[in-house]
Amino acid sequence: MNIVQKYGGCYLKNMEDLSAIASHLAQSRENSDSLVLVTAAMQEIAEAMSARAASLETEIGSDKLDAMFSAAEKQTAALMAAALEREGLRAAVIEDIKGTSLSEVEVFAGKHELEIGRIEKALQEGVIPVVAGFQGIGKYGAEDVQGRYGAAATAVAIAAGLGCDCQLYGNTKGIYTREPAEEGSVIEKISYEEAMELIMLGESDLESRAIELAKAFGVEVYVGPAMEEEKSGGTYIMDRSLIVQEAAVTGLTVSDDIVVYTLKGLPTDGDRIAELFELLSDLSVNIDMISQQTCSEHSCAVSFSCSKDKTSEIDQAFEVNQRLRELEIYKQDNLSLVSLVGVGMASHVGVAGRVFSVLAQHAIHHYNITTSEISISVAIDSSQKAAAVVSLSEAFGL
């Protein structure tokens, strides 16, 4: 049975780390003939690359940066293959994999494909393919990098092509029931939908594209600590039909530095509202929550929340837009977004009522609210975040 393993930068700080991985794989040699390795860039190589780029004291184009950092990935893959051979294992570097884009549009359309013939050939010959994550060959023959955490998406895409499972070893020991992680416990099994919702709502140590790919192609993903003989920790991400779900809520996550804008006096015909969100789209603002309240027969108020780092751009855009500038605009900052996630919400009655009851009992004021089939999110004052996390975690057994 094939398996794809991806090692992130936290496991590849230097040559000592790389050698330790190679030694571990040699000791578990019975699985080595069916193993594909995907490596992120070694930290000391990436840091040296960054320092050289900074020494130029000029803005470097994205295509040049892509070429530089994909080179760091390739160097790491070559060193890993050499270290494996030193341990008596046969290994080969597989780079410049051709395939369609890993963009979200391609993923959701289910169109992603990789040319994995070289990987399959290596496996058939008893050779461990070592693949540089983060990069490949794009439409025009140039480096097509996948961005931060791109090695995870590469690993899942290869697993999809081989029809096997994928193990992601990175900064996290699994997906936790609550934040901060040390106060929660690792979730043993979680659905693709829950994992993606947690990522979107605040979980930063996972890559959404990797999980989107896994869901599209039915790849079971393990996220947890590396070099564990038995996967006693970590989280398995899989199809929800394979999970016996008893609890309504699986996990709780928090996003800080949230801002809520409220615009009053918008006409209800929809034109001005469409203009508002087209403007936000042009600014690449990721909207967390949207709510609309009717003020009169012909006017309404619209609220939306977003990350604080976009507020200066939004403020400037509102100032120069004559039609929006005429409205009453209010901004609330120093907010946090607390989100409860669980596929069990679809079959449990009264989850929302319980959330609001807990918040009321602890005098925690909430602003915007949004729900989906598997999540409830509320914006609250950041000063009350700790109280909200503790009280909601206790209420739902997290």
Image (tube, rainbow, N blue to C red):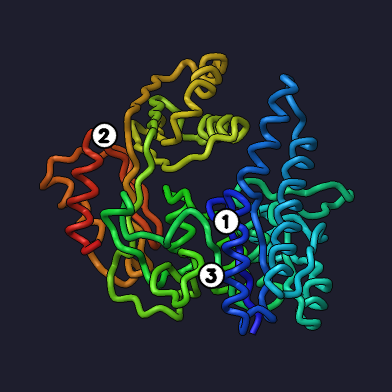
Image position, residue 227 (x, y; %): 51, 68
Q: Residue furthest right?
A: 141
As drawn, the label of residue 294 is none
Amino acid type at image mark 3: Val
Question: Looking at this view, is 21 or 343 the one in front?
Answer: 21
Q: Nearer the viewer, mark 3 or mark 1?
A: 1
Image position, residue 171 (x, y; %): 48, 53
Cα distance between the residues tagged 2 and 3: 35 Å
Rendered residue at 67%/36% (across/down): 48
Cα distance between the residues tagged 2 and 1: 42 Å
As drawn, the label of residue 17 is 1
Q: Is residue 2 visible?
A: yes
Secondary structure of the residue carrying numbered label 3: strand
Quick check: marks 2 and 1 in contact, CB under 8 Å? Answer: no
Amino acid type at image mark 1: Asp
Q: Which residue is mark 2?
A: 381
Secondary structure of the residue carrying numbered label 2: strand
Instruction: Give above or below for 338 relative to 32.
Output: above
Q: Which residue is mark 3?
A: 221
**Quadrant where the C terminus is found in the figure:** bottom left
Q: Nearer the viewer, mark 2 or mark 1?
A: 1
Mark 3 Cα-neighbour bin, 10 Å: few <14, some 14–19, many ≥20: many
Mark 2 Cα-neighbour bin, 10 Å: few <14, some 14–19, many ≥20: some
Question: Looking at this view, is 280 or 62 the one in front?
Answer: 62
Number of labels in the image equals 3
Mark 1 Cα-neighbour bin, 10 Å: few <14, some 14–19, many ≥20: some
Image position, residue 34 (x, y; %): 68, 80
